[in-house]
Image (spheres, rainbow, N blue to C red):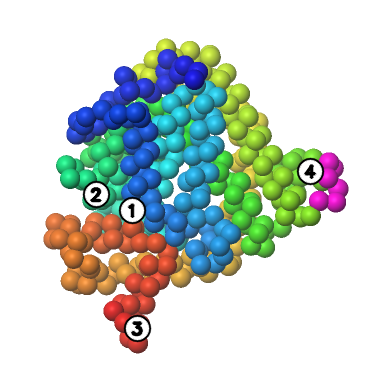
Amino acid sequence: MTELAPYAVTESNSRGRKIAEVAPQGRSEFQRDRDRIIHSGAFRRLEYKTQVFVNHEGDLFRTRLTHSIEVAQIARSIARRLRLNEDLAEAISLAHDLGHTPFGHAGQDALNACMKAYGGFEHNLQSLRVVDKLEERYAEFDGLNLCFETREGILKHCSADNAAKLGEVGERFLNNRRPSLEAQVANLADEIAYNNHDVDDGLRSGLITLEQLETVPLVAAQLSEVRHAYPDLPERRVVHETVRRMINTLVTDLIRQSESNISSQAPATLEDVRSAPALIAYSPGMNELQRALKNFLRIHLYRHYRVLRMSAKAQRIISDLFGIFMADSRLLPPQFQSLAEHDRARAVADYIAGMTDRYAIREHRRIFAVEEGV
Ligand code: MG
């Protein structure tokens, strides 16, 4: 195995776990974090939560589970090439969406609106809350008791107000410091994964077309290469050949630019990384190209009228559920009733955020449809 770079996160420079534990045998601390994440209940629920499409719309679309696995794959490739801690990059990637609400961005916006008067709802913060508190599996602690660097990577964004309440893991948002390179890698791997799979799922659903995508330079370049090399290729294969080339182009550019940033900044330690500007980045040209792709997806896919119709339904379901549980917390399942005694709104948000798409739809029916069993 190649040796890790001197500024990579290791067990010796790690700030460790909140509650000290006996060192694992036969695996590293970060492998243990990854394993705990995979065995968590929140991780299994990702299978029935969506990004853009609602879970029951089709079996071929990405869910948050397959998305997280794709993020981990991309992050590991980059981390290995840059001699960073691959296990940490993988753990962060697999955990990054654990706090997501049902119904993707629509669900998150709806829950945030409901929580406005009660401290708001941020999905990154919720992912941290899941691994720090909400998973109830271990005898000696709440949550998964993950290493600081894994938790730091999960908390990708955070408002200053919330950061101030979080202690050590929130400090970098107040002091303008960066997280580890492994966290920076996982963050950009997330973006590479969703931009590309949204192109793929968008085409499969018929909401966007290849002709439209020809206006996007990053896609057009790869598409014309594929069509030129394989003039008679069926369309599904054209799409996949194009998407795999796009991922490869983005990853290759990211590695090259990051290597150059690292060599000019020359960090000697992990602490140097934290005080340097973000070192994991695309080249300026690629940054423009991927921005144009994002923009295209926002206009043509995320704001497609069929996606917006589903979003409207999702918002309705979430605000109905929030309203009724806030009005009468006795309707909550028992474990959330006890949380609600302390902070009703947060308990309701925790309950709703943990729901899968189909569970939220069923729960809405159970509560609001008179003919439905309770
Ligand atoms: Mg994600």
Residue plotted at (50% across, 28% down)? 79
**Residue that mark 1 sits on:** 41
The three-letter code of the residue at mark 3 reads Glu
- Secondary structure of the residue carrying tag 4 is helix
Separation (CA) of disc 2 from disc 4:
49 Å
| Residue 226: image location, x then y, percent | 79, 43
Q: Mark 2 points at which residue?
A: 137
Assess disc 3: are there few (<14), some (14-19) or many (≥20) residues with their C-alpha within 10 Å of its C-alpha: few
Quarter containing the C terminus = bottom left
Magenta segment, which residues? Answer: 228-233
In the depicted structure, whether residue 270 falls above or below residue 219: above
Quickly name the residue at label 3. 372
Q: Is residue 210 above or below residue 69?
A: below
Q: Is residue 42 left or right of residue 267?
A: left
Residue 230 is one of the magenta-drawn residues: yes
What residue lies at 34% left-to-right and 37% top-to-bottom?
Answer: 33
Q: Is mark 3 on a helix, strand or loop?
A: loop
